[in-house]
């Protein structure tokens, strides 16, 4: 069903590799971005019985880690 919806939406709006799994991860990451202290609520919404499963959504991406490192106020010359 997701594949059919992606196709109907058009490749210029939604990447063709979009799947239910991608949409679930997108929702989880956006939920945590808006409510960073509500991992229990997210677990409930996703139907996880273990917070360890939900914790996987909190793992930062390489890009996020790189950005965080760049924002550290550290200068060897000051």
Image (cartoon, rainbow, N blue to C red):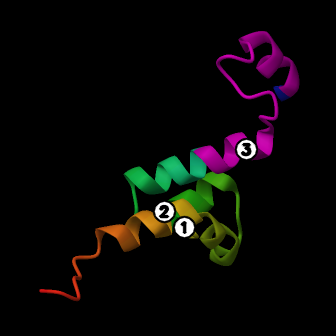
Q: Residues within 10 Å of mark 2 (few under 14, many from 20)?
A: few
Looking at the picture, tell me which residue is in the foreground, 52 or 60: 60
| First of labels 3, 2 by sequence position | 3
* Mark in the foreground, 3 or 2: 2
Image position, residue 62 (x, y; %): 57, 66
Q: How many marks?
A: 3
Viewed as shown, does residue 8 lie left or right of 47?
A: right
Helix, strand or loop for disc 1: loop
* Mark in the foreground, 1 or 2: 2
- 52 lies above or below 18: below
Instruction: Quickly name the residue at label 1.
Output: 60
Q: Residue 55 colored magenta? A: no
Image position, residue 65 (x, y; %): 48, 69
Q: Which residues are magenta?
A: 3-26
Marks 1,2: beta carbons within 8 A: yes
Instruction: Quickly name the residue at label 2.
Output: 64
What residue is shown at x 69% (from left), y 24% (from top)?
14
- 41 lies above or below 52: above
Q: Residue 18 colored magenta? A: yes
Instruction: Quickly name the residue at label 3.
Output: 22
What residue is shown at x 52% (from left), y 67% (from top)?
40
Which quadrant of the figure has residue 47?
Answer: bottom right
């Amino acid at each position: 069903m997701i594949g059919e919806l992606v196709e109907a939406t058009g490749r210029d709006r939604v990447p063709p590799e979009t799947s239910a799994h991608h949409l679930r991860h997108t929702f989880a990451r956006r939920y945590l971005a808006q409510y960073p202290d509500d991992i229990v609520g997210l677990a409930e919404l996703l139907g996880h019985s273990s917070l360890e499963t939900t914790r996987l959504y909190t793992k930062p991406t390489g890009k996020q880690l790189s950005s965080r490192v760049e924002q550290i106020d550290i200068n060897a010359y000051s």
